[in-house]
Image (cartoon, rainbow, N blue to C red):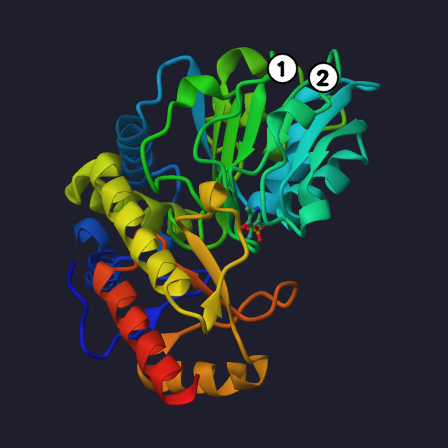
């Protein structure tokens, strides 16, 4: 992977680093997209060029994730927050019970949104361990007739990730994959709904991808706005209204880039290696620590603290001076967080580890 000298290694949790070739292509095409003399932002979404882009992006995503014809793939305006509010409206009839498995703050927020529309049963809540582990499946309290089971395969703030798909419920599984989608292969057939905001592994903020099993659509509550009704958006190829065309375009470039990288198996290998070496550096040191149980540590978001938090500020300043940016942890957790999405090159992780070792040697 290329990395220009003037670019920093950006560890932001999102909006996050994008692949350089994607940015370069967007730059090269900005004034004249496909010989039109216009940018992609200035053309109709109903024109043949954009319709072709939309079809190509869906086809590439289907190929990357192995999505069958049993599923619709939708590109929807807004982020994951709008998507988790849309889930109960689409899947839970009035009076229905819905199951939520909480392993971090995004799951909590999704459950709070669902509580506006349905009876929420909390299957298990990792808050007791400060979200440092996934509660044991034996302790999960599923409801008998849940409309669906919602969970967050990767919790971006605390860095807790499921490394396999929970297999406990007959209710359709709904997954907020905002910070893990496309980081490795997954078996889409295990899910009823997968959704993800774009600004981590897909592209630019403003759009979300939603993959939904066709038989789960068509039963949205009558008060559901059309722009978030899965059936309405599916029937209209995600263009019932004007989509966020530029964000969609960037997603299409990112999907092509992933295919050029060798697809999800290749990226998964690289992501596993990146995360393993950073966790090893943390665990091998007495100065840095990560509280998450080993079997549920995130490959995408690695929080860590310094033994002496009065050094946080100087750590961040020196890291930024060394071209390692956006390492400040989330306000809920403190310390540091390194996000290692697909577009973070392995060289960035190597540079971070070298910096951490040097900082420990001189300050620790
Ligand atoms: N879910 C997860 C797992 C997230 O990481 C985020 C954003 N960081 C969201 C939901 C919310 O996404 P948005 O801000 O795009 O609505």
Out of 234 and 148, give the one closest to the viewer.
Answer: 148
- Asked if the residue under mark 1 is in contact with the one under mark 2, i.e. CB atoms within 8 Å, the reply is yes
Is 264 displayed left or right of 360 in the figure? left
**Residue at the spot of label 2:** 146
Residue shown at 26%/57% (left/top)?
Answer: 19
Vertical position of residue 234 compared to residue 14: above or below: above
Q: Secondary structure at mark 2?
A: loop
Mark 2 → mark 1, Cα distance in angstroms: 6 Å
The answer to whether residue 147 is visible is: yes
Task: State whether residue 243 appears in this view.
Answer: no
Residue 308 sits above or below residue 98 on the image? below
- Say whether mark 2 is within 8 Å of ligand 1: no
Residue corresponding to mark 1: 171
Q: Name the residue at 61% across, 31% down.
A: 136
Q: Residue at x 51, y 35 (%)?
A: 195
Crowding at dot 1, Cα within 10 Å, few <14 / some 14-19 / many 20+, comes out as some
Which residue appears at 49% of the width and 39% of the height?
177
């Amino acid at each position: 992977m290329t990395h220009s000298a003037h670019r920093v290694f950006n560890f932001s949790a999102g909006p996050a680093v994008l692949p350089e070739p994607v940015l370069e292509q967007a730059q090269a095409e900005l004034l004249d997209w496909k010989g039109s003399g216009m940018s992609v932002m200035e053309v109709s979404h109903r024109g043949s060029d954009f319709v072709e882009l939309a079809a190509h992006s869906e086809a590439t995503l289907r190929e990357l994730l192995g999505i069958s014809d049993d599923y619709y793939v939708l590109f929807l305006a807004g982020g994951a927050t709008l998507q988790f509010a849309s889930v109960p409206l689409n899947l839970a009839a009035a009076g229905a019970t819905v199951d939520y498995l909480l392993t971090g703050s995004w799951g909590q927020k999704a459950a709070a949104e669902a509580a506006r529309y349905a009876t929420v049963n909390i299957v298990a809540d990792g808050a007791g361990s400060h979200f440092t582990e996934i509660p044991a499946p034996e302790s999960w309290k599923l409801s008998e007739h849940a409309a669906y089971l919602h969970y967050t395969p990767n919790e971006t703030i605390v860095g807790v990730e499921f490394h396999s798909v929970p297999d406990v419920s007959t209710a359709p599984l709904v997954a907020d994959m905002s910070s893990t989608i496309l980081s490795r292969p997954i078996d889409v057939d295990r899910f009823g709904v997968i959704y993800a905001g774009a600004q981590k592994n897909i592209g630019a903020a403003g759009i979300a991808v939603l993959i939904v099993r066709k038989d789960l659509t068509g039963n949205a509550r009558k008060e559901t706005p059309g722009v978030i009704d899965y059936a309405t958006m599916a029937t209209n190829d995600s263009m019932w209204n004007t989509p966020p065309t530029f964000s969609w375009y960037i997603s299409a470039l990112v999907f092509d880039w992933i295919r050029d990288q060798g697809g999800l198996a290749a990226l998964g290998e690289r992501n596993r290696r990146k995360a393993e070496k950073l966790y090893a550096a943390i665990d091998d040191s007495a100065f840095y620590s990560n509280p998450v149980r080993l079997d549920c540590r995130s490959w995408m978001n690695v929080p860590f603290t310094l033994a002496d938090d009065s050094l946080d500020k100087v750590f961040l300043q020196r890291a930024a001076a060394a071209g390692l940016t956006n390492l400040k942890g989330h306000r809920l957790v403190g310390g540091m967080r390194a996000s290692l999405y697909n577009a973070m090159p392995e060289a960035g992780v190597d540079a971070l580890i070298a910096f951490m070792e040097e900082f420990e040697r001189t300050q620790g």
